[in-house]
Image (cartoon, rainbow, N blue to C red):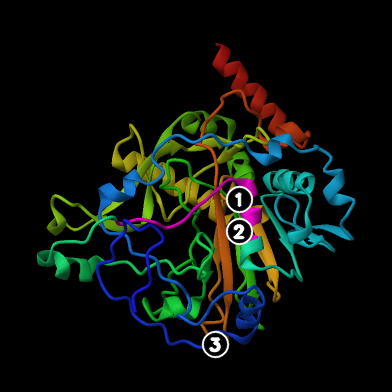
Amino acid sequence: MAPAPIDPRIVDVAEPKKDTLALPASARQRLEKAGIDLSAGYPYRPSRPLYLDDVYKIRDQDRPHVDPGSRADPEKKALLSAAKEVIHLTKHIGTEIVGLQLKDLTDQQKDELALLIAERSVVFFRDQDLSPQQQKALGEWYGEIEVHVDTLSPPPPLFLSIIDIFWQPQVPQVPGVPGVTVIWPALQATEITPSFRRPGGASRWHTDLVHEKQPAGITHLHNDTVPSLGGDTLWASGYAAYEKLSPAFRKIIDGRTAIYRSAHPYLDRKNPQSGPKYVEREHPLVRVHPATGWKSLFVNRAMTDRIVGFDKAESDLILGYLFDVYEKNVDIQVRFKWTPRTSALWDNRITIHNASWDYEGSEPRHGTRVTSLAEKPFFDPKAPTRREKLGLLSPVEIEELEQQTELLTI
């Protein structure tokens, strides 16, 4: 039986493929403890995206967003004093909090966690007793939850063969908990077969949901099942990537915008035979985080398509360099080894991430993810960099900034 859509207006176009994979025991135990009804099958499959114009209509209006980190105590005393230990994993990015349960955080602690994530880019909590419902509730504190609700009408029968060619898999969700996405690589492998040479999926540097008018803020991934070896996830700091650029080069990209496209294509309703089209949005190449006020590079190789106003050759050259700076400087990255029942909360506004598939599906992995949408990206030329604000600039960096300031005044 086809699952009911999240929105009653949505009409699916085909009977979904029935999932026959065995749910990992640890995942089943967590879901059953949370009262998730698995009797109709798992995961739940909402109706699938189809037409480009329908997707553009979703969340197309401006929505107010107040970042919880902007109202937090800068010293984060309520959060940090309650932890048994606070471990900074690298100089620039990544912090692990020991001894706290995310489900028990007070409102003040949630705000302070948002600020900590904004400062450290990604924060980890191990040994969490966390239901999908509690995970969603925390996500709602940080912004509007992203729910995949995309297609509003079925296609004409004439174009079914075209849809078969370009169709994208449905986004699996936890039954009865809209917005809690299922991350189950073995399930995705039944739709698009990965290989050692082409692992695909999340095994590339990317940022979530950049095609949204107001893209993703904090994403919370809770992994209840992980392989015993491999399957690490990497994050890179957008603050530090921007700071790797010379002051002169920053002037080239400051205030510039680029076109960011969706991960999946859709059909043009008026001309389906023209092939797949992507959702495209225009955002600044450099954005400012509303809680820290720091500048961050906002590009990713998977979904940043072109710089507005530049010729293609110029755009490709600049973007290629920016991608390399972000991806190849290991000193601005953190690589995290998962353990069962661990949560990672990261800020998509100031990071890119990459999931390693080195375990090659040899062991089960399963988790749930909630993404909170944030503000419309903005740039402020007066905003400082992270190193400027924290007083971390070296004498060489200070001299470079002074020289650039002198050039601008001549």
* Separation of residues labelled 2 and 1 (CA atoms): 6 Å
Density class for disc 3 (Cα within 10 Å; few <14, some 14-19, many ≥20) is few
Left or right side of 350 for 105: right
The amino acid pointed to by label 1 is: Glu
> Residue 10's image quarter?
bottom left
Quadrant holding the N terminus = bottom left
Q: Label 1 belongs to which residue?
A: 140
Q: Is there a contact, CB below 8 Å, between mark 2 and mark 3? A: no
Pointer 2 and pointer 1: residues touching (CB < 8 Å)?
yes
- Give the magenta part as a residue range: 135-151
Q: Which residue is mark 2?
A: 136
Please state the horizontal and vertical placement of residue 364, each as a whole percent of the image: 57, 84
Q: Earlier in the sequence, mark 2 or mark 3?
A: 2
Q: Nearer the viewer, residue 315 or 125?
A: 125
Image coordinates for residue 401, horizontal then vertical, percent? 65, 26
Please, is residue 120 above or below residue 184 in the view?
above
Position of residue 341 relative to residue 228, above or below, is above
Residue 150 part of the magenta segment: yes
x%, y% of residue 126? Answer: 75, 68
State the SS at label 2: helix
Q: Which mark is residue 362?
A: 3
Seen at 62% across and 53% down, the residue is: 139
Residue 287, percent across and down?
A: 54, 36
Query: Looking at this rendering, what residue extends furthest in the front direction?
Result: 8
User: SS for tag 3?
Assistant: loop
